[in-house]
């Protein structure tokens, strides 16, 4: 059976290889697909911290993804219309600089995750799933009714935001940025999973009472994990909005929350490269099956049912021959 | 803002609330008895609405359409219980979420495949169309009034079923201790199928009833499903009474908030900004309500367990 580390390296090399091959073959659309996969994978890496290590089945991560997207949309729309952003106490200029947008996206998503987490982590199990879903939906409806930033129609940005020293309009350079962000996200995940904090969080998933008995507070561990998780997903949202140069309430829809969970489960829950495997397969399926039939999601649903009922552990579970770091 | 408008909006809120109750009652029974989170409940709502629209278009009878909705949703419920859901009772919540999410994809896209992407329409029956004049001179659509009546009747029926019948005793016993009632000779898997079919039929009925005042389209069940979750979080899992109170609270908050919050903001703000802030806040009102209930009572108003 293949060790997990080899799979991780192979998958990352594969994603990078596809993008580089597309440059040589002059196939910019394939680069866009690879970029899309990298960004979705980053969002799912964020969710994997809460879901895979902490066991928190959050069905509201689209909220953080969308908040990241709107952070980009709002800042960039103010920059392109040269109107300052009125925050009540002070006004700020909009910006087209990616690092600033990323920082704002990460902070805004972390703040939202802190609020949602503080409320929803008072409960667990089925309640937690329903509450994260409901709060996610709250942001969705808020975005729809918030007509100042496009409401239901969303916000278009004419030119992709800039990164110092790079030409982000060149597909491969933008892919490079997203790929680097994915690597950083995965490094954080790996570092976290092996750290005392990650071990405690993992223990809190398996037996909260014992963790409490050794003097750690499970709820606090989960809240910290949830905030980090939301922040990473928020960064992915900002990148996703920049990829499409468009942000709309669809980024906040609960289908996206469901799809992020699907990505993780296809790859393998709690696996470092699980989200990447899932995202690559998902984007490929979406592209190929979507070209064959308009109703490709029927087959996605059927495949998903098959994985849940018969192939617990996902693709990486099948390859390594172990159901997972945990079941 | 006149008293008549307020009374009308309260009735609208009640009508919305009782329809939510039909959804939430089935969900909360399934949670309570089987411990299962069923995201596909909205798909059953949609199934009912589509079955009703198809039968109504073929026969012209609203009564037959309602019967078709009940039968189709119950049948779909029994099928997915036997084929999929049954394998998930002992599984972790993550698997339940995924499998029922997969069912949504299959149902939604499958329905689109069969019926196309255009919305269908279901007409309000002749007998129930047109307005009635209520005491106080309020003109109100008879059909919506009938919905309130049907919803309340079903609430009473469910109360009777769960507290006064043998099946109800088994359902409540199943909520408390499934091993024990299985040991006492109750066929637990048949009970589960039955409860699931009952919940599905209620969802299908709600879909058909609401389908006559909205359009019947793919994905119509999902907003209702999420509101039903909010209802259950507020009411407490497994409690029919909680689902009823929660549904009315959510229905009234959503309807009245949408009307009165913009008006309230208009008292202190410019009309433009008031409409903006009011509608934004109104769209979040029920979730804020849910947040308050959570802080106050994490297991819901009538929930026994957290």
Image: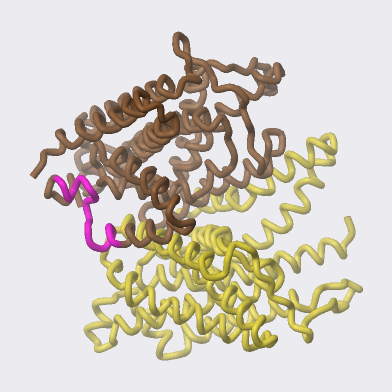
**Residue B297 sits above or below residue B40 on the image:** above
Give the magenta range: A306-319
Residue positioned most to the front: A25
Membership of B264 in magenta stretch = no
The chain drawn in yellow is: B
- Give the camera-side residue of A266 and A94: A266
Residue positioned most to the right: B137
> Is B192 on the left or on the right of A324, as rendered?
right
- Give the camera-side residue of B267 and B53: B53
Q: Quick check: can you spot residue B139? A: yes
The quadrant of the image that shows the N terminus of chain A is top left
> Is B188 on the left or on the right of A283, as rendered?
left
- Spot occupied by residue B272 in the image (x, y as percentages of width and height): 82, 37
Give the colouring mode of the picture. Answer: by chain
Colour of chain A in the image? brown
Residue under the image location 37 percent in, 80 percent down: B193
Residue under the image location 59 percent in, 62 percent down: B117
Q: Quick check: can you spot residue B301? A: no
Main secondary-structure element of the magenta-colored stretch? helix
- Spot occupied by residue A138 in the image (x, y as percentages of width and height): 57, 47
């Amino acid at each position: 059976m293949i060790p997990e580390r080899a799979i991780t390296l192979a998958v990352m090399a594969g994603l990078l290889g596809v993008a580089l091959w597309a440059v040589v073959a002059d196939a910019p659309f394939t680069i866009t697909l690879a970029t899309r996969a990298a960004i979705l994978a980053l969002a799912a890496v964020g969710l994997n911290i809460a879901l895979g290590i902490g066991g928190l089945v959050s069905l509201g991560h689209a909220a953080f993804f969308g908040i990241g997207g709107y952070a980009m949309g709002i800042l960039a729309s103010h920059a392109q219309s040269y109107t300052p952003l009125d925050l009540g106490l002070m006004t700020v200029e909009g910006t087209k600089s990616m690092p600033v947008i990323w920082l704002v996206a990460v902070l805004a998503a972390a703040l939202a995750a802190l609020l949602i987490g503080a409320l929803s982590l008072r409960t667990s199990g089925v309640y937690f799933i329903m509450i994260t879903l409901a709060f996610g939906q709250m942001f969705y409806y808020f975005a729809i009714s918030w007509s100042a930033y496009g409401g239901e129609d969303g916000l278009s940005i004419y030119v992709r935001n800039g990164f110092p020293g790079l030409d982000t309009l060149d597909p491969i350079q933008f892919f490079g940025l997203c790929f680097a962000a994915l690597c950083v996200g995965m490094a954080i995940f790996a570092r976290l999973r092996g750290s005392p904090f990650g071990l405690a969080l993992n223990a809190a998933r398996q037996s909260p009472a014992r963790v409490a008995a050794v003097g750690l507070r499970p709820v606090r561990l989960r809240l910290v994990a949830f905030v980090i998780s939301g922040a990473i997903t928020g960064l992915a949202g900002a990148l996703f909005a920049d990829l499409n140069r468009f942000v709309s309430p669809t980024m906040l829809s609960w289908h996206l929350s469901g799809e992020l969970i699907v990505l993780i489960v296809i790859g393998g829950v709690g696996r470092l490269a699980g989200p990447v495997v899932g995202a690559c397969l998902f984007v490929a399926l979406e592209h190929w099956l979507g070209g064959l039939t308009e109703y490709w999601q029927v087959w996605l649903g059927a495949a998903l049912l098959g994985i849940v009922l018969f192939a617990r552990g996902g693709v990486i579970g099948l390859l390594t021959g172990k159901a997972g770091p945990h079941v | 803002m006149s008293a008549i408008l307020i009374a009308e909006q309260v009735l609208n809120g009640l009508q919305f609330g009782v329809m939510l109750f039909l959804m939430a009652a089935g969900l909360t029974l399934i949670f309570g008895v089987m411990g299962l989170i069923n995201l596909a409940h909205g798909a059953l709502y949609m199934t009912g609405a589509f079955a009703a629209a198809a039968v109504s278009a073929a026969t012209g009878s609203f009564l037959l359409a309602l019967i078709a909705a009940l039968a189709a949703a119950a049948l779909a419920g029994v099928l997915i219980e036997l084929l999929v859901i049954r394998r998930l009772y002992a599984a972790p919540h993550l698997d339940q979420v995924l499998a029922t999410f997969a069912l949504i994809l299959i149902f939604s896209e499958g329905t689109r495949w069969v019926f196309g992407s255009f919305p269908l329409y279901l007409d309000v029956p002749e007998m129930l169309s047109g307005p009635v004049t209520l005491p106080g001179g309020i003109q109100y659509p008879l059909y919506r009034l009938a919905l309130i009546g049907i919803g309340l009747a079903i609430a009473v029926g469910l109360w009777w079923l769960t507290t006064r019948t043998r099946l109800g005793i088994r359902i409540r016993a199943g909520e408390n201790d499934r091993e024990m009632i299985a040991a006492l000779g109750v066929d637990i898997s048949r009970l589960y199928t039955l409860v699931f079919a009952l919940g599905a039929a209620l969802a299908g009925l709600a879909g058909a009833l609401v389908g006559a005042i909205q359009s019947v389209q793919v994905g119509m069940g999902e907003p209702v499903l999420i509101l039903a979750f909010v209802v259950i979080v507020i009411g407490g899992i497994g409690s029919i009474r909680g689902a009823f109170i929660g549904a009315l609270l959510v229905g009234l908050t959503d309807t009245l908030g949408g009307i009165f919050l913009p008006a309230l903001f208009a008292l202190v703000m410019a009309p433009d900004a008031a409409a903006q802030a009011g509608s934004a806040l109104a769209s979040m009102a029920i979730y804020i309500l849910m947040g308050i209930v959570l802080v106050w009572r994490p297991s819901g108003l009538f929930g026994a367990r957290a």
